[in-house]
Image (cartoon, helix red, strand yellow):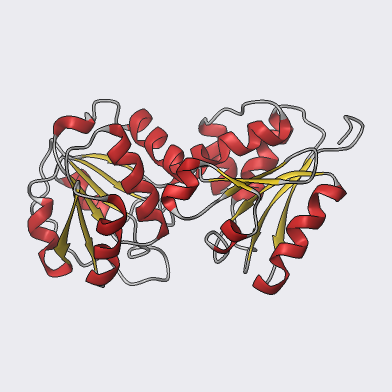
Amino acid sequence: MTETRIPLAGVIGHPVAHSRSPRLHGHWLKDLAIRGHYIPMDVEAGNLEQVLRTLPKAGFRGVNITVPHKEAVMAITDQITDRATLIGAANTLTFKEDGSILADNTDGFGFIENLSRNAPDWDPAAGPAVVLGAGGAARAVISTLAEAGVPEIILTNRTRARAEQLKLDFGQRVTVADWVQAGNVIEDAALVVNTTSLGMAGKPELRVPLDGLRPEMVVTDLVYTPLQTRLLREAEEAGCTTVDGLGMLLYQAVPGFERWFGLRPEVDDAAREAVLA
């Protein structure tokens, strides 16, 4: 790719019209005065490989991958980073000069960066983390918490079998608790993380008992519509440090943008406002 070509990137999903990534990357491109574009692309599963192999020829530097393609894309790419392999999914693809595709997962980076910047007093070694949910986001969160040095990760999910599978994948540091016990295990946590879609606009509420929340806890919800979920509202009322889910979306986008467009963007109030607009 020569420097005379306008750099292109985008996000691929099915559907993809709801994605906030184009607003965020569009803001950064304008803010950094980069002559590039970031484009949403609705691609069905049957066309995914053909589209990915064609994009580098059209001047694309890379793409974000969102649902439902995060796992499927792993079989299409040429190189996979260790963290994407561990998580079993990719959200950030970079196209090399020869057209080969590198798959990475920056969800864990986005999660821990959001947590450390917005709850700077949180100490990974302070005690157990309770993770609600056992989907793709939970995999990214668990791998990152383990790497950060959290001594025990208590995982609970409505379908216990999915949680047991994650325990098999991530080993002895993960303990599985029944969903009906979620309220009880929260009592002993230093960190509580909701990785489910429960509490999101248009989804059922998270109906886990929250009377075990204490002021010394940090509570974060990956849901960012609404910004303040019931979990965060009740945690705030209990005196906990709370961290909303929007920051994870912002920070996970930073490494890809830097690889594709050559400059590292700032996660600031203006970026948040661009996404929320």
Q: Picture coordinates of residue 164 (x, y %)?
A: 24, 64
Identified at 10% across, 64% down, the residue is 181
Asked whether residue 209 is in view, the answer is: no
Residue sitting at x 69%, y 29%: 31
In screen coordinates, is 28 left or right of 232? right
Q: At x 77% / y 56%, what residue is drawn?
A: 53
Residue 13 in view in this figure: yes
**Figure quadrant of residue 69:** bottom right
Tell me the quarter of the picture where residue 262 sits.
top right
Relative to the observer, which residue lies in front, 43 or 239? 43
Q: How many marks?
A: 0
> Considering only vertical position in the picture, is 70 above or below 108?
below
Q: Nearer the viewer, residue 199 or 88?
A: 88
User: Which of the two residues, 221 or 88, is positioned nearer the viewer here?
Assistant: 88
Residue at the image position 42 percent from the left and 48 percent from the top: 86
Q: Is residue 125 above or below residue 71?
A: above
Is the N terminus in the top left, top right, bottom left or bottom right quadrant? top right
Question: Horizontally, is 123 left or right of 86 in the view?
Answer: left
Q: Residue 199 at what x, y percent from top left?
A: 33, 63
* Place of residue 197 in the rendered image (x, y in percent of width and height, measured from the top left): 37, 63
Q: Nearer the viewer, residue 226 or 252?
A: 252
Q: Position of residue 102 (x, y in %)?
A: 64, 44
